[in-house]
Image (cartoon, helix red, strand yellow):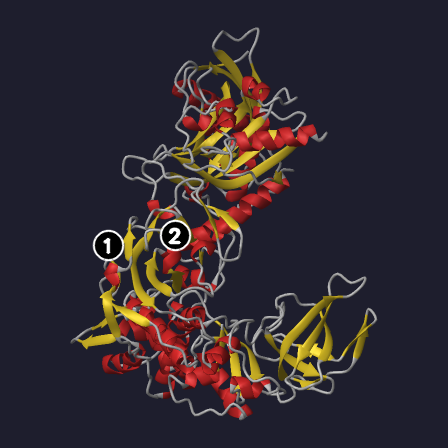
Amino acid sequence: MRTPLSWLQSLTPLPVAATDRAAVADLASALDSLGLVVEHVEKVGEGLGDVVLARVAEISAIAGADRIRKVVLDRGDPNPVEVVCGAWNFEVGDVVPLAPVGAVLPGGFRMERRKMRGVVSNGMICSARELGLGTDHEGILVLSEAGLSAPELGITVAEHLGIDADVVFDLAIEPNRPDCLCMAGIARDLAALFKLPFHLPEPSITESDPPAASLATVAVEARELCFRLTGRVLTGVALVPSPVLVQRRLTMAGMRPINSVVDASNYVMLELGQPTHPYDLDRLSGRGLIARAARPGEAVVTLDGETRILGTRSARPGDDIAALDCIICDAEGEPIGIAGVMGGRSSEVEDTTSSVLVETALFNPVAVLRSARLAGLRTEASIRFERGVDPAGLERASARVCELIVQAAQAAGSQPPSISRGLLDDRPVTSDPVRIALAPDRVNALLGTTLGAEEMAGLLAPIGYRAEIRPDSLEVVAPSFRPDVRREVDVAEDIARCFGYRNIPRTNRRSPYVGRLNDIQRLRRRIRRILSGLGAHEAWTSSIVDPLDQARSRWSGEVLRLRNPMVAEESALRPALLAGLLVAVRHNSGHRHPYLRLFEIGDVFRAPDATGLLPVEREQIGLVLAGESDDAVAAVQAWRTIEEALGLRDVELQQQAPGTAGAPELAGLHETRSARLVLRSDGAVLGALGEVDPDVIAAFSLPHARIGWLELDMARLLAVPRRSLRARAVSRYPSSDVDLAFVVEQSVPAARVRDILQAAGTELCESVELFDVYRGPGVGEGERSLGFRMRFCAMDHTLTDAEVAELRRRSLEAVESALPARLRG
């Protein structure tokens, strides 16, 4: 935001001279300390002594040139000046700044005679940026338009605009400081910092009959979009140039002066932060304004000449109406502007305007933000409405606009307009002051200060807070122009700013854990390394999925659907990772890379449980094994690798009984070649593993005969008990292996048999490994043979044959007594 020093000094007596470089630098540093970061400092008023006012007498084309024209200028003397110009925003009769040959412009640029397309240019018509009076470089600075009373020709621009040396600070205003999107807010903070008086303009207007209510109306039909709509009526308006001071300040702030009415509206927006909009009352059908929600397909031609289609977001039952576009209509309901963004051409103030309705409103910030983005417009008004304006400042802003219009007419020697009696006001929503309880001890702990309650109240008072000191707390009332202040921490930030960030002592970090990963982050990294070691590549699949893919993966639970999906094919939140990874395998298969392993760590979303309204969101690990020989065995081996690497214990595989309802984690897996991972202590399900059902593989059009799958719940995996990390001593004596094959029922997990054998082998049993699973001749229907290799070893001697035979006997008896099992012959 461009902020002229002289404008600030009209609100608070800053003891800074524009020519004092050191003082200007100190002021820039003070603005930085207030959080109003100075991005650039621009000096104004230097190098304008050679630039004079000239009227455009003639404009003609140049043969062979379509981007430049020959312009003849009248400086008020008998010798016209011919120049070549590439700008097109002026016409015959306009008064523009002319830099003749020999003139030295701001920055030391000396004007020379040039020849373009065979035409000699004896100078240059200047833009605001070239004169250091603004940022506009696209067009010429028009000082007076054709048809209006022209200033004296031949005088310098500095003399015409009354420009003295000045400084413009280009400030970066953060979103949490809407009050500083105006000169008053910035001056208020500086006055508080330097302990200077602050003067907010108090407009003085004289009202007269007839009452405004007899000439116009205002009404709000959508209280969720427009909280308040006001209007003031001026009659007998004559459009004149604004006073030189107003034009100068607007120009330095980056705006082009137009006429007394429009300039007054822009000036008040920059001064007080409240956007206003003047309408030609005679061009308003029904002589009134209505604020309502846009209907689908409504169009309005905005001031920039573009046709905007509104109402593209339709409201459905349960939708928030604040998601709709708010429009301003005339009293007959015809759209004439996008509320808070830009007005329409149909009611634009023109040269023939004699009656003006000045609209001042309070719009829903969210509605303005959405409308501005949808329309592709970002205006000075929309920026302020998006961040929030002062709900208590509408009357002041409205009166200030009227005051400036009257003053402009008086300065031009015209009959001042009449201000009709009364403020038109429709206020369906009222706002109460925000009260916040402040604990001084907590604020000091947050800021690292030792301020007392009285000191805090003293710091807050100059920036608009009202405070009441209590025995153990401080209750403050936030000023109405600070809609961003809602919590104690917001007030603490203001205390820090007013106290001065540089005055807060620095403290070293005391925590030794800065930058340390938490448990879930460490586990996530370890899982990634383990799965990468298994030859798997990490994939990313969207959490917004096609419900049909979930159906193909045989997900039978509820799928959470989006209310407003971008496309129908992506209209639900994923309940599991399987479908997304199978789609990724299909994509790779279509690119001649069918055999691969992929894993993903991501969130899945399930329907809310009985205790809450929000979806249940859990982080899961999914591993799809689609190599040439991958199957359920590969999935079990992957789990054993993870189990061993993480030192997990007390986890067993539980196979679902055939013909029973499948658990959600087994959805999409083969009925007899899959199992759940369950914690023995409490039965918590950690995940599932096995083979993807052949019908699911076919539904995803994959060429694989078998695909392995492993799924784990990250949070539950973190809670699994771990084995001791202490290393076991290694025996220097040879070990002995014993192979045992048991015939058990199909429903008996292999892990159950392994655990029994491990316990029976005592401390001499180094390991128990499953090496064979057999179904076929010699094994009954509904049974299978499980072959285990047990390795025995002693720490102090080589085991004898008798000792090994005794260990084998114990192991055999342990299994046969604990399970319906028999030794396979």
Give the mark nearer the N terminus: 1 vs 2. 2
To which quarter of the image does residue 216 belong?
bottom left
* Of 236 and 578, the residue lying toward us: 236
Asked if labels 2 and 1 touch by Cβ distance under 8 angstroms, the answer is no
Between circles 1 and 2, the one closer to the viewer is 1
**Between residues 489 and 406, which one lies in front from this camera angle?**
406
Residue 327 lies, with reference to residue 318, above or below; the image says below
Vertical side of 537 occupied by 62: above or below? below
Q: Position of residue 76 (x, y in %)?
A: 63, 85
Name the side, left or right, on which 162 lies relative to 422.
Answer: right
What residue appears at the point 49 percent right and 7 percent down from the top-left corner? 781
For label 2, the residue is: 367
Q: Is residue 291 above or below residue 704?
A: below
Does 200 sit above or below residue 255? below
- Whether residue 790 is visible to the viewer of this picture, yes or no, is no
Instruction: Give the residue type that dot 2 points to.
Output: Ala
Q: Which residue is located at x 52 percent, y 52 percent?
A: 376
Q: Which of the 4 image quarters holds residue 277? A: bottom left
Q: Alpha-carbon neighbours of circle 2 within 10 Å: few (<14), some, or many (≥20)?
A: many
Judging by the rendered image, the residue that carries numbered circle 1 is 428
